[in-house]
Image (cartoon, rainbow, N blue to C red):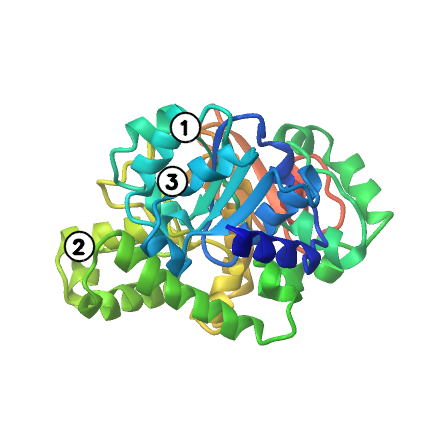
Amino acid sequence: MQAFFKTHKYLLEHLNVPVHRGLMDLINWEDRLIGVVGTRGVGKTTFLLDYIQTAYGSDKACLYVNLNNLYFSNRSLISFADEFQKTGGQTLVLDQVFKYPGWEEELVWCYDNLNDLRIVFSGSPLMLADRDNAELERRARIYNLEGFSLREYLNHVTGNNFKPISLEEVLSNHVAIATDIVDKIKPLAFFNDYLHHGYYPFFQEKSNYLENLLKNINLILEIDISYLQQIELKYLPKLRKLLYLIASSAPFQPNVSRLSNEVETSRATIINYLKYLKQASLVHLLYEGEADPLKKPAEVYLENPNLAFSVARGDVSAEVLHKTFFCNQVGLRHQVAYNRKADFLIDNRLSFNVGRPGLASGKAAKGQELWYACDMEEIGRGREVPLWLFGFLD
């Protein structure tokens, strides 16, 4: 166990956290079993270490452990956690928990039997998908860590400390809010950079961002999806091809019969692959009406604009990038659905077009409000809200 404490100490000494993640303030850290899930590259390990440093500092009452360590091929998580608690441990932070076989059952055992121990664990969102997690879900509080919002990106590159804003606040008071922000920075000066390389925190590293992103995408396909969904590796090229077809055609209205021919697989497999890509936070599926993973989505977007530059090599129009940005930033806390009359339907009551009135087509259905998310506009008016401001949502 001392070797893990040495690693723990080293990681904290070399930790660099330039931006406080908003999720940190939403988690009830008093819960005894907490899960933080997120796709590769969004900064789960840094997030966990930031929590440790903030809450415990160098106190050995908390220990960070990566369960990908070979040590756990010959040591059970239960016995390790039991020893840690008996020697004074209070909080065990477990990274990449899905790499450990039987992690769900052993976490449940620890919760039920080690009453003085708090466990925080992290992993891929796919580890909870399509499984019977009733025992775990009754005990654990699960949170999703997303990539940087535009607000978090701006806080990092400008040194500001902009606070998150609710959608209701934006719609009711966007002129005053935008004016206050524009007095401090020029958001549009950073907007295209964010679309290109601002979503994943590793943009801070001195390396080729798009190549790193492509590596992460391949790891998601080869390990997270293939391993956790038990897809044979020989079918991996079909999954890759589907993702490329989506990236090069988004917003994509899937014709399942045509896709099954192009990818050379069955219609049912196409629906499953779309679901897996959604669970892995690579695409955003929009449904008409209630979301139903068993039916064909009405429209498919990439999960965030950065993916377009890596998968489709940036061969995507500004209009599509802006719609992808809107869908990504608003979709974190709100239901984004397909809209026959406009670009998006938010929470089943707000119709949105991305673009300026007169240029963006579409209208509101009966009983819905029509709003515009206007690109290249610093400050809006009426129901015309600057597109960048949706990157400040909580």
Q: Earlier in the sequence, mark 3 or mark 1?
A: 3
Judging by the rendered image, the residue that carries numbered circle 3 is: 79
Would residue 21 be visible to someone looking at this image? no
**Counting other residues with Cα less than 10 Å from the Cα at mark 3, is it few (<14), some (14-19), or many (20 or more)?**
few
How many angstroms separate mark 2 from mark 1 (CA)? 37 Å
Foreground: disc 3 or disc 2: 3
Give percent across and percent down for residue 184. 86, 49
How many angstroms separate mark 3 from mark 2 (CA)? 41 Å
**Disc 2 secondary structure class:** helix
Residue at the image position 68 percent from the left and 37 percent from the top: 55
Give percent across and percent down for residue 260. 17, 61
Judging by the rendered image, the residue that carries numbered circle 1 is: 111
Residue at the image position 51 percent from the left and 40 percent from the top: 92
**Counting other residues with Cα less than 10 Å from the Cα at mark 2, is it few (<14), some (14-19), or many (20 or more)?**
some
179 or 276: nearer the eye?
276
Identify the image quadrant of residue 102. Answer: top left
Residue 269's label in the rendered image is: 2
Residue 307's label in the rendered image is: none
Q: Quadrant of the C terminus?
A: top right
Query: Label 1 sits on what residue type?
Result: Tyr
Query: Label 2 sits on what residue type?
Result: Thr
Would residue 193 be visible to someone looking at this image? yes
Give percent across and percent down for residue 22. 64, 40
